[in-house]
Amino acid sequence: MRRSLLRAVMAVVACSLVLPSLALAGYGDTIDMTTGVTEISRSVHSLHRTIFYICCIIGAGVFAVMFYSIFAHRKSRGAKPATFHESTTVEIIWTIVPFAILIGMAWPAAKVLIKMEDFSGSEMTVKITGYQWRWHYDYLDEDIQFYSQLDAAHNAARQRDSGVELEQFEHYLKEVDNALVLPVGKKIRFLHTAADVIHAWWVPALAVKKDAIPGFINENWAKIDEPGIYRGKCAELCGRDHGFMPVVVRALPQDEYDAWVADKKAEATTAKLDAQREWSHKELVATGEGVYQRNCVGCHQAEGQGIPGMFPAIAGSDVANGSLEKHLETVLHGVGDSPMQAYSTRLNDSELAAVITFQRNAFGNTTGDTIQPSDVRSYRNGQMQSLATDTGYFSNFNVTGAN
């Protein structure tokens, strides 16, 4: 009987240790913490596995002793309860043993945590600013900056009554219009902050997760070993569209990254030239439609109908059919105490001119108005300085260089 009981206890212990391994082997990164593609991510994964198995062993041992005690010392077998009140020896043992286990786990964990914060020797720096609901990436060593937000096709598909078949998307709600492009093999320092509420930039494959807090700069780093596309998200509840704020990192070999940098700088030069020329009304409307799909459709909806009780319609609105200056002011500065945010730092002069022209000539609005990038620039030059002086808010975001 005792041998059968011992075998049963050993079977319980074996299953407790083996089954988790089989589960992890079968599902891999689906349910387990990802191994990742950085030295830190592999260290974190190794710690996770080690501590997981320690917990399994402890759990198996505790439950085995408990089941044995319940079975072997049951009343029906005539077992008599012990009469002692306490045992100093037992209390010392169950204090020292857990303490030793915790120290054994804390020592390697502390080494990894210290290494996570050691961004000395970084070879490039990227500033990441969280907005509702997009990311702004600023390559401080390359003079490159851009916004990254949910891909327009995914954004349109998620709208109410969109009628879009979601099966066509391989990574639904996980694609962006502009991925963060990084070189492999370089130690990259990340600076995290936010412009409105608390966000958190998280990419599991890089073992990078840091809160982005308005008025503060948090730091961490990564050195990516393998080219590829790595996805993440905002890990802080940052508002109604929190679930539509993905992160996509594209890691490239150094020569491909250098080519991307050259292309990005050429795009910036083209954008500056575009802001200085006269656009046709047709060009502005066509370009503005794309800007609207990327930036406005989430609140004002695909047909400009808005969401009753939450976001006003653009179709037939007083703003889109009223004073052109008032329309520009609303888009630039937002509306206080409302979800309408300021786009003065998020869109350049050409994009602002295009989206305003589009809104005034779409959704049944037929003003026929056209606003040029030069008009937006003139308005900025006349108004932005006073805002920066009065509030101190815009001075942190290089408003005068937004062109």
Image: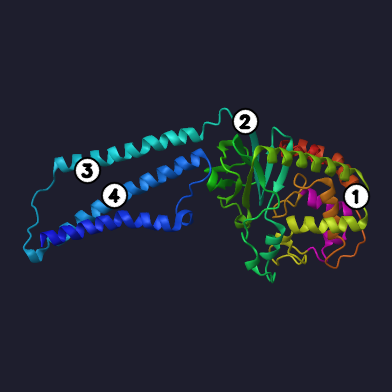
In the image, what residue type sits under mark 4?
Ile
* Mark 1 touches mark 3? (CB < 8 Å): no
Say which label, 2 or 4, has the lower sequence index. 4
**Which residue corresponds to the image point at 81% horizontal and 37% vertical from the top-left?**
385
Residue position marked by numbered label 2 in the rendering: 123
Q: Magenta stretch: residue 331 in it?
A: yes
Whole-Å distance between the Cαs marked 2 and 3? 49 Å
**Which residue corresponds to the image point at 66% horizontal and 64% vertical from the top-left?**
158
Whole-Å distance between the Cαs marked 1 and 2? 41 Å
**Mark 3: few/some/many CA within 10 Å (<14, 14-19, 20+):** few
> Closest to the observer: 100 or 75?
100
> Closest to the observer: 175 or 346?
175
**Which residue corresponds to the image point at 60% horizontal and 57% vertical from the top-left?**
243
The stretch of residues the image draws in magenta is: 314-333
Whole-Å distance between the Cαs marked 4 and 3? 16 Å
In the picture, which quadrant includes the N terminus? bottom left
Percent x, y for residue 397? 73, 38
Residue position marked by numbered label 4 in the rendering: 57
Say which label, 1 or 4, has the lower sequence index. 4
